[in-house]
Amino acid sequence: MIDTLRAIACLLLACGMTSGQQLSPQARERMERAHQIPQRAPASEVAQELTQQAAEVRPGGAAVKTPVERRNFIDEHIFGRIERDGIPHAGPASDREFARRAYLDATGRIPPIDELLAFLEDIDPEKRDNLVDRLVDSDEFVERWSYYFEDLFRAGNRMGFGKNLFHYWIVEWLRLDRSYADVATDLLTQGGKSSHSSPGALYFARDFVKAKDDPEEPDALDLVNRADAIDEFTITYSKVLLGMNPGCISCHDGAGHLEKVNVFFSRKTREEFFQQASFFGRTRMVMNWENGFQANTEYTVDDVEPGYPTSSESIVRVPRTGGSNEPRFILTGEAARPEAMPRDELARLLTGHIQFSRAITNRIWAELMGFGIVEPLDDFDLARYYPDQELPEGWSMQPSNPQLLDAMARDFQAHDYSFKHLLRTIMKSNAYRLSSKFDGEWKPEYANYYPRKFVRMLSAAELHDSIVTATARPGSYKSGVDDVATAMALLDPAHVNREVKEFLRAFGQQSRDSLPAKTARSSLQAMLMMNSQVVLDRVKAEGNSRVDQLLGRLEDDRIVIEQSFRTAIGREPSAAERERVLDRGLVEKVYLATLSRRPLPAEMDIALSALHEDRKQGMENLQWALLNKPEFLFNY
């Protein structure tokens, strides 16, 4: 199949053009890049492989067939299918497993040891729901998810100084739990001087296509190719807000090109793309020209143009050959109302369509559950969404569970597009609370039932901040004018010291010039975990680190041990007994702080032997070793 698709992709370069049309070098490069079909395994297969590997290196339970309590509509869909088809599923996650998972998903870091112990000792039967509520309402939740959305919205250097404004805008809408539909409306409709007053306008302005180095017009209106910039943004917001990629039909009709790639878009034309782009037909971005220099991250966005130019010159794609520029929504064919501003109409039509809600719920489901109900996340094929649709030969239905995805999308709509409600709904389901451990025969066809919790590797920022939490050694970074202690709090992950920047980049942090993508595991990552100062400096017994704190409380711990001996067996402990109990406590605490669990008996024996030789060096080595366990790198 991949070879066939690749052959088609190569042919695409020659298709869709009439005799005599020529591509510019920039257009050819972009088109070749757009039609590359990566040879990578489906997300569900990657998740299965990671989950199996992670399961082999940590404790866990067995697969079971006992019925699971259905706590909400997600469970009705998941366990209803599982029971109907007789699929075995994992047992429930333990409290420690759930706590680590919930902290990572909600706040982007492992649980602090004191909070973990308090949760484990809590006897309230509703403590898991209570934990989810507390985490979703925390400042750390805002940090974690603002970082996620800044990656998704590519809030990088192309926003210039405006990324400060964009950052605080995202922080505030997450803190207030503002309607995600209103957020999308801002991204599509705001105008003004983008870097100073209109955070939403920055999203459009960052997709500028530079036309020339020096203006010929007095007001520098010709520095941006307006039609190309609109096309680029139409593709961007379609992928992010609708989970659909119309990039191919921005250059040619779908018929004869996309039948083996996306059935829905194979039935669409370039003119229909023009009509979708025409919602921005009146809109321009004016690059500031100040004192004889381009300020190419400073724009004024307004709506004064007569319409989308369907025959204008292109720098980055096949020449335009004309067609209708009446704004029409590509999913329904509905036209913009003539009395309304086209961009306002786009926001109304887009946010009111269920595909808008499907796209974000599918993204968040993938983030929390290992992979999406639809994959790839930004390439929905609506012509093969439901099982009763007539599919072309060779095609199968795309979603693994369209009924569940639609139910989540409608619930999201019914709760005013509340992002916090979406997170709570998933995290309070028993589907989310299954263990990732599945002892017994695993079959790949089980995956789409979600009968276990699938593992994902920590993101670069999650890994950094979990190291900070485990070692109690915060960073010291500048984020705009603020001093911050974690990667998640950074305004721009590119603006840190070289050591941290290289660490983050190796584990997948991208420049925010492109949409986020998963990074494969590598030997470089293993080398950095073993040798980077990001890790080495933090495990030292100095600077109030975790090891430093634990060793600094030894005298207090000795007093507690002696009192416990007197209470329990009526005598003082011998020096050897006291020191051995002391070492066991140190080992247990560093395990809980780092892996969110207590050591197994064999692990305890090895750790005790290391501390016996040199307690300080042994503790430093122990935490370094735990940070380098594969178990630490996964959210399971």
Image (cartoon, rainbow, N blue to C red):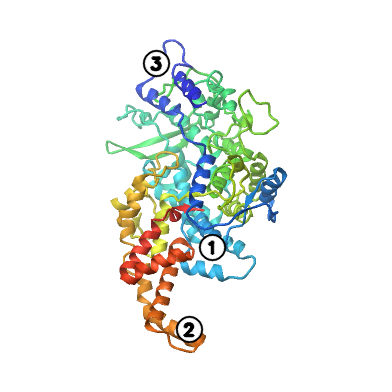
Q: Position of residue 597 (x, y in %)?
A: 49, 63
Q: How many marks?
A: 3
Q: Position of residue 391 (x, y in %)?
A: 65, 26
Q: Name, please, the residue furthest toward the top.
A: 19
Q: Are marks 3 and 2 in contact (CB under 8 Å)?
A: no
Q: Give me the residue at 43% from left, 62% from top.
A: 594
Taking 486 as reference, is 445 left or right? right
Taking 296 as reference, is 339 left or right? right
* Circle number at residue 564: 2
Question: Is 483 located above or below residue 516 in the figure?
Answer: below
How crowded is the residue under tag 1: few (<14 C-alpha within 10 Å), some, or many (20+)?
A: some
Q: Give me the residue at 54% from left, 18% from top.
A: 256
Q: Are marks 3 and 1 in contact (CB under 8 Å)?
A: no
How crowded is the residue under tag 3: few (<14 C-alpha within 10 Å), some, or many (20+)?
A: few
Q: Amino acid at mark 1?
A: Arg
Q: Position of residue 139 (x, y in %)?
A: 49, 60
Q: Amino acid at mark 2?
A: Ser
Q: Earlier in the sequence, mark 3 or mark 1?
A: 3
Residue 562 visible at all: yes
Question: Is 581 located above or below residue 81 in the figure?
Answer: below
Mark 1 — residue?
96
Mark 3 — residue?
22
Q: Position of residue 403 (x, y in %)?
A: 68, 41
Q: Nearer the viewer, residue 87 or 114?
A: 87
Q: Nearer the viewer, residue 615 or 39?
A: 615
The Cα atoms of the two marked residues, 3 and 1, are separated by 62 Å
